[in-house]
Structure formats: C-alpha cells, structure tokens
Image: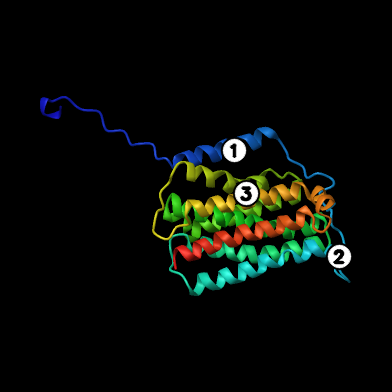
Amino acid sequence: MEHLGIATPAARTPWPRSAWLIVLALAAAAGLWWHGPIVQWSHYHDFADAAAWGALPNAANVLSNLPFLAIGVWAVHRLRHGTAQGPAHGAWLSLAVAVALTALGSAIYHAAPSDTTLLLDRLPIAWACASLLCALLAERVAPSWGRATPLAAALLFATIAVAAWAVSGDLRLYAAVQFLPMLLVPAALALRLAPTAPGAVTGRDWLVVLGLYALAKGMEAADHAVLDTLMVVSGHTLKHLLAAAAAGWLLRSAITARR
C-alpha cells in the first residue's frame, strides 16, 4: 500500500526453531537454581563389585575403562588423518580426546575411590559433554559453534562446573554440564533442525546414542541389583561398557559421515 502513501508494517522476523533450544536450556537452568544445592550422597563410593584381581583393586570397574581409551585414540587418529574437516571437526576431535582421558581419570578413581580421585574422573567427562554439545550445535544450529572460541568457552565452563563441586560440594553446575546435551539432543531432533552442512551425524545415530546412554545411567543406578542378579558383573561395570559403546557409536558416525 506504499503507492497510496500508507506505510505498511515491517515484516516480522520468524522465530527460528533453534531458539527453542535456548528456551529449554534456560528453563533447565532455572529449575536447577530453584531446586537448590545438590549434594553427593554419602555412599557414592560404595560400588557393588570391589573384587581385586591380583594386586589390582576394584578390577572390573578399573579395566572396563579400557574401551574408552581404545575408542578415543582410534577416533583422534581418524579425525586427524582420515576425514574432511566439517564445521564440528574441532568439537569432535575434542570429544575424542576427552573420551581417551576419561579412561585414565575413571581408572584412577576406581582404583582408589574418594572425592579427590573423583575430581580426575569428572573433569574429562565434563569436557566430553561440553564437546558433544558444541558438535551438536555446530551441525544443527550454526557452524560457528564449532569454532575455537565457543569450544574453549564450553570447556572452560565444564572445568569451572567440576571445580565448583570440589569447592562447594554443590553438583548443580556439573549436573547441568552432564545432562544438558541429553536434553538438547532429543529437542533438536524433535524440532527437525536441518544439518548446517553435509556430513552431519544422522538423527538415527543420535537416537542410538541416547538409548545407549540411558541404559548406561540405568545400570549405574542399579549397580548392586545387577550384580545380585547376574552374579558375574555389576551395574557400574556395564555402565562403563555401555557409555563407551555410546561414545564409539557417535564418533564412528561423525567420522563415517564426513569420510
């Protein structure tokens, strides 16, 4: 109607579907804040399987970390030498390194469980979660999430989250780092966010990873019950194997997609 001298209202910018991820993340943060401090339960270090193999204490829970090391080292090699560098390349490489470090940190912790050694366990896990989240956002929201600055900021926040628990005993920040990817991944799939570039991990592969991770957390919660039922392996040992399988599936998918 401008030809009649009547101004037309400016077209509204459509609300991007990816913005719902911000809303969801803020809602989760508000929920954690409202909940108040989350304190680690007193029997956290009481694992079902404490059997030693020779001089190695808590052997099953220590040795079940070896798959993390194998998967991490393999993925670092393939990402550095065998794939094209997509927008999430740095995040996937960071995830692979964190998975390999998880083997070391978790093995040290399970050899002598305490709050002090648990710090070495939680740090690489937090880094892995931060890297995974950046990879998801780089592939499904904006390629800039895979750049060095956002990735470094995410890794720094993950480090602060673990340090905050070590200093205050409050697990809220660590819980946010660990579970936010598991909240935003299904949300991104439900919103049908299209890949930002070719070679992204498929929705089917993300669903497999979510399923394996959910099983791992279930085994962790049922540590004693699983050992009482199966007699030969505990829930926590199976948790390590399932979590390693999830990491392996995800990294294999990222590598294969961009080969």
Marks 3 and 1, Cα distance to the nearest angstrom?
11 Å
Residue 121 to residue 187: above or below: below
Circles 3, 2 touching at the beta carbon (< 8 Å):
no
- Which residue carries the number 1 mark? 28
Left or right, 221 with respect to 29, comes to: right
Element class at badge 3? helix
Element class at badge 1? helix
- Which residue carries the number 2 mark? 57
Q: Disc 3 or disc 2, which is closer to the eye?
A: 2
Where is residue 101? Give x, y as percent.
67, 65
Marks 3 and 2, Cα distance to the nearest angstrom?
30 Å
Looking at the figure, which quarter contains the N terminus? top left
Where is residue 53? Give x, y as percent.
86, 68
Where is residue 45? Give x, y as percent.
83, 52
Looking at the figure, which quarter contains the C terminus? bottom left
What amino acid does circle 3 point to? Answer: Val
Compare residues 107 and 175 and report the one nearer the observer: 107
- Tell me the residue at 82%/59% (across/down): 232
* Sequence-first disc among 1 and 2: 1
